[in-house]
Image (spheres, helix red, strand yellow):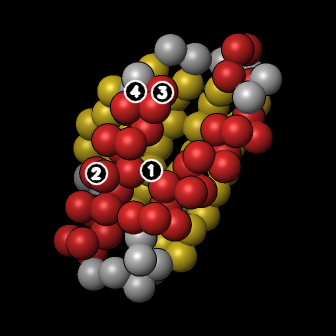
């Protein structure tokens, strides 16, 4: 198993950041078939070969994930896609 831990700074108000995280989750769901649900300020997600969370923090988001065997081989691609979507949505 491989772990992902990405922090991404932003200057959005909390409600707009939450909306942006929803958009990030939708993109990841589309790309990787993930299911997600909010628990407080954390959006938990899971799917075939991945479990993780997107935590809304003041001025930043933190994405953590554990990749299963098959996705571990594509860790770099998965990290790049997460970073790309965060950059696109958290502006």
Asked if 54 appears above or below 44 in the picture, the reply is below
Work out how far the residue at label 4 is from the one at label 3, CA to CA, in angstroms. 6 Å
Asked if 12 appears above or below 23 in the picture, the reply is below
Q: Which residue is mark 4?
A: 34
Tell which tag, 3 or 1, sits nearer the viewer. 3
SS under mark 4:
loop
Q: Residue at x 70, y 14 (%)?
A: 70
Residue 33 image position (x, y, % from top left): 41, 23
Work out how far the residue at label 3 is from the one at label 1, CA to CA, in angstroms. 15 Å
SS under mark 1:
strand
Whichever of labels 1 and 2 marks the residue nearer the N terminus, that label is 2
Work out how far the residue at label 2 is from the one at label 4, CA to CA, in angstroms. 12 Å
Q: Nearer the viewer, residue 12 or 23?
A: 23
Work out how far the residue at label 3 is from the one at label 2, CA to CA, in angstroms. 15 Å
Residue 86 image position (x, y, % from top left): 49, 60
Work out how far the residue at label 1 is from the one at label 2, CA to CA, in angstroms. 10 Å
Tell which tag, 4 or 3, sits nearer the viewer. 3
Tell which tag, 3 or 2, sits nearer the viewer. 3
Q: Residue at x 48, y 27 (%)?
A: 32
Q: Which residue is mark 1?
A: 54
Whichever of labels 4 and 1 marks the residue nearer the N terminus, that label is 4
Q: Please report contact status of discs 4 and 3: CB closer than 8 Å, yes or no.
A: yes
Number of numbered callouts drawn? 4
Instruction: Identify the disc placed on residue 32.
Output: 3
């Amino acid at each position: 198993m491989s772990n992902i831990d990405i922090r991404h700074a932003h200057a959005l108000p909390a409600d707009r950041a939450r909306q942006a995280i929803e958009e990030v989750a939708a993109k990841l769901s589309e790309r990787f078939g993930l299911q997600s649900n909010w628990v407080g300020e954390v959006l938990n997600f899971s799917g075939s070969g991945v479990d993780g969370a997107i935590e809304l923090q003041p001025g930043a988001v933190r994405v953590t994930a554990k990749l299963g065997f098959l996705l571990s081989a594509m860790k770099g691609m998965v990290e790049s896609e997460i970073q790309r979507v965060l950059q696109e949505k958290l502006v």
